[in-house]
Amino acid sequence: MKIALGQMNPRIADFGANRNTILDLARQAREAGAEILVTPELAICGYPPMDLLDQPSFLQENLRSLRILQKELPPDLGVLVGLVDKSTEPGGKALQNSAYFLYQGKVLHRQPKTLLPTYDVFDEARYFAPARTWSTFRFKDIQIGVAICEDMWWETERDASVRYEVDPVRNLLDGGAMLLLVPSASPFYAGKSGIRLRLMEHIGRSSGVPVLYVNTVGANDNLIFDGHSLVTDRSGKLVHQSARFAPSLDLVDPFASTPETTLVGGKDQDYEDIAQALRLGISDYLKKSGFSKVHLGLSGGIDSAVVVTLATQALGPDKVTAFLLPSKYSSTGSVTDSELLGQRLGITLKTLPIEPLYQGFEKALAPHFENRPTDLAEENIQARIRGTLLMAYSNKFGSLVLTTGNKSELAVGYCTLYGDMAGSLAVIGDLFKTEVYELARHLNKEREIIPRAIIDKAPSAELRPDQKDQDSLPPYELLDEILAKYILDHKTKPELIADGYDAELVGKILSLVARSEYKRRQAPPVLKVSTRAFGTGRRIPIARAFSELTWL
């Protein structure tokens, strides 16, 4: 049986475009000889629709699209489509996340999603009622079960607060499923493909049933979907993997004797995936929001160098403008390194010195700052002048500002509200500083794009004479180790000290993280590429006790 994997990039609430994409995929699949087409989770409306689900018209458009597809899909092709549906369960939420199997103009099968994730970036139980019953259906002598995304993830480790009582896959297998179709909208993070594959391998080895996992591709706000749909055969062997970070239509026969394929992994692949994910995150954020151009401040440092390189690769040099915003503290190398990078990328470079504006601020504030030493207030004024200039250009020319702060800075508050945090999208806000350096080296793998001098220089905000990041922070290698264990691994202060880290240093870092929550709450969306990104995936109260932090 030839089955087509329709890896598509839906736009949330663009029902007409999503419907046309499904129809195009169906026609191509039928012409290629497919008997079934599988599309991703909520392909009709896009994922995640969030509070659009509160609008009655949103549900109506889902159902209207379903009926149109019933009439217009090739009648001799079975098509699995995902949509928001009315709940058939008594009580509870009024909606369900459902998959419909359409054939010959009829609904042959309906399966709602059972496991509704509420950890990390997910909040599906807020909107949907879970399925209480599971059934398989027969199509051309094959008994088929449908497990929507999380329904396949029952056995994997997840957030400690999550414990599911039901195993939908087991119930489908008990119901006689000879084939599992898994429509999914699974957000990317580095290394996630390996986790998906291990789940599928286990199902195949323990049941003798092939699994077709079809993932969405594209980016919606801070979430990036990598596609990379997978197929395992009856023994759990990987026999197909679709493109990473690009739409595709692939035909597979999961019952045929097919050579095993290997999932490429490792550090180099992780950084290639991260680079592709961030480029897709930039391009889709603009396209789906109705913009076409970006700009940013280019400081001569590693962070802005990586962001401008990714943006240029994602959009093309004609869509990217970089501003050099030197002050009296900017080194000559910062300017010349930025100019060299801009020339290599072929982007537009503009220079706006901030010193005259800064002097104006100094004069205006002099009566109020009298007899007080120069400190962080004056440093932040420089950052806010730069933010104001970049936002003014955005207003005038309809270009979006990309921020250049990294995860280490966001974690400890080494960033300025309304200054370097001003913008529309935080491209590398989910990469620790050490990871930014690794990504820069990866981007330079084929040829030197980012000048070596930018990678080699000591990090500095250049807001006072001879300033270095390490004047205020521990070395990034040490800082990032502690931050990763605290933010990603949920280690407490006593556990970090038991791991051998200095107690005073741990206390200082955790205090900085806690006290900077109000800043992160005002940051632009952070493109998610790790297991726990700042934003919707990490919801911490701003007003809370954090004086002792012994319980953290």
Image: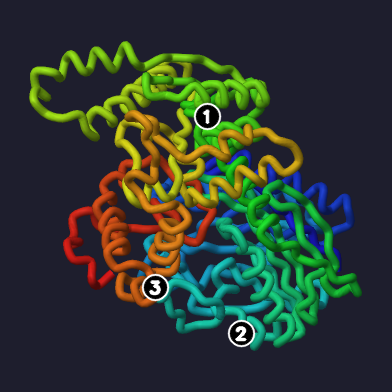
Callout in the foreground (2, 1): 1
Residue 287 in view (yes/no): no
Residue 227 position in % (x across, y down): 67, 54
Q: Give the mark nearer the N terminus: 2 vs 1.
A: 2
Q: From mark 3 to mark 2, how far is it between C-alphas?
A: 44 Å
Q: Position of residue 345 (x, y in %)?
A: 66, 26
**Picture residue at 43% right of the left edge, 80% below the top:** 163
| Neighbour tally class for label 2: few under 14, some 14-19, many 20 plus, Cα within 10 Å | some
- Judge depth for marks 3 and 1 and give the one in front: 3
Quote the CA–CA distance across marks 3 and 1.
50 Å
Residue type at tag 1? Gly
Residue 241 in percent (x, y) is at 77, 61
Mark 3 touches mark 1? (CB < 8 Å): no
The answer to whether the residues at label 2 and label 1 have Cβ atoms under 8 Å apart is no
User: Gap in Å between the C-alphas at discs 2 and 1?
Assistant: 44 Å
Q: Do labels 3 and 2 touch, CB within 8 Å?
A: no
- What's under tag 3, amino acid-wise? Gly
Q: Is residue 316 left or right of residue 320?
A: right
Q: Could you say which is closer to the camera, residue 340 or residue 398?
A: 340
Secondary-structure class at tag 1: loop
Up/down of 499 relative to 189, above or below:
below
Whether residue 319 can be seen here: yes
Q: From what the image shows, is residue 227 above or below residue 327?
A: below
Q: Nearer the viewer, residue 141 or 364?
A: 364
- Per the image, the residue denoted by label 1 is 290
Q: Name the residue at the front extreme.
A: 466
**If the image is split into quadrants, where does the C terminus sit?**
bottom left
Who comes first in sequence, dot 3 or dot 1? 1
Left or right: 198, with 123 as reference point = right
Q: Which mark is residue 170?
A: 2
